[in-house]
Image (spheres, rainbow, N blue to C red):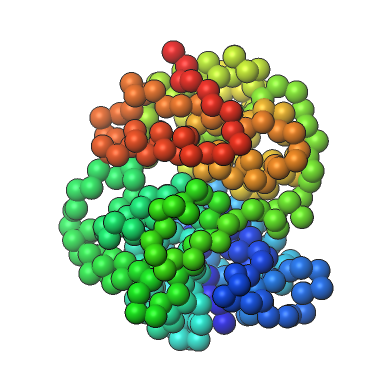
Amino acid sequence: MDLAFVESPVQLLNVLEWAHAPAPAAAPAQPGPDAARGALVRGGDLTVVVLSPTDPMSRGQLRRMAELARDEGIAVRWQEARGGVHAVVRTVRALGPLLRRAERIVIGDPFSRYVQLLLTLVGTRRLTVVDDGTATMEFVAQLARGERLVRWHRRGRRGPRELLLAPVSAAARRRLDPCGGREVELFTAMPVEEEAPEGVTVAPNRFRWTRSRFGPPLLTRGADLVGTSLVETGVVGPGPYLEAVAMLARTHGAHRYFAHRREGADKLHRLAAATGLEIVRPDLPLELIARRGPVARTVLSFPSTVVHTLPLALAGTGVTVAVCDIAPEWLRDTASPRARGFLAGVTGTARHVHRLSAPA
């Protein structure tokens, strides 16, 4: 049995893409009841466990993604995993039988302390990591350098909670290291092939499932703008961000703003009032929303996951994806020292996108 742990809608989308992607040569696909129509070409018995987050936007998108997964014949288990130590204990106890039976573990966020804890409880030597956005790029780099796993926007200080969980993180880090007979696969749309450590199998995510199930979309005039959580993570100041969005909207004739699921209502209200943009709260990951359409002929974004994934999901539709650089003066004092270089790398490595200079 393959067992996947997801905590975000994008992770669940990429587990779906992994389940429907051609199997690597080293692991030939097994025929199954859906083989005739190309579904679940990797075969096997896949169960997805949703470690449900608390914010309403993420929960709503995950509910919709869970419906799509069930329609594809995948078993989905919704686990209310948050709410303190007691919720963690209940979750571990409830998942015990699945953890013992799992032949392969699929995860979307190797930085997640929750997932790291679960990794220490399984005995399988087969592990797959699917994308949870641009964080995959930092994960691969840290894995190759043998470093502890720290999200790129964190400043790196280790508080009491980090020190308490350090043994769990270290044990999970060893599970992600392809040595001692462990089989580690990375299923990704990110450009990480050259950085991947020896022994890690890199399988490309081409969004085959998304393109086969949705679209092609109806194209509209003007531009759509994709929101980010750079303000919420303390990387970019709210003032410069609002000014940059307004400038992009005026310059490119943008009409809609697709909000990131972490963006708050107050911020979006100010943004709508200042720019006149229609704020859209997607009920699915943007790759599916854009592929389903309608979508503008130009999609504008700041450095984020979508500058890598949208060109793949929208291949052949005539949509242009353009990425706007982050100016150094937009960064907050709370931004980590790695933030500027990481964001530049996200933009610089994006394929099939149009580069825009940061608005003055």
In-front residue for pair 196/21: 196
Which residue is pictured at 57% across the width and 75% down the height?
Answer: 26
Asked if 261 appears above or below 254 in the picture, the reply is below
Which residue is pictured at 67% across the width and 28% down the height?
Answer: 298
Which residue is pictured at 28% across the width and 65% down the height?
Answer: 169
Q: Is residue 304 left or right of residue 72?
A: left
Instruction: Locate residue 288, reporting x and y percent.
Output: 68, 48
Q: How many marks?
A: 0
Residue 112 visible in this rendered orientation of the protein: no
Instruction: Locate residue 31, reporting x and y percent.
Output: 73, 80
Instruction: Locate residue 315, reporting x and y percent.
Output: 71, 42
Instruction: Locate residue 332, reporting x and y percent.
Output: 30, 29
Asked if 190 appears above or below 324 in the picture, the reply is below
Residue 312 visible in this rendered orientation of the protein: yes
Which of the 4 image quadrants contains residue 340? top left
In-front residue for pair 93/210: 210
Which of the 4 image quadrants contains residue 121? bottom left
Which image quarter holds the N terminus? bottom right
Which image quarter holds the C terminus? top left
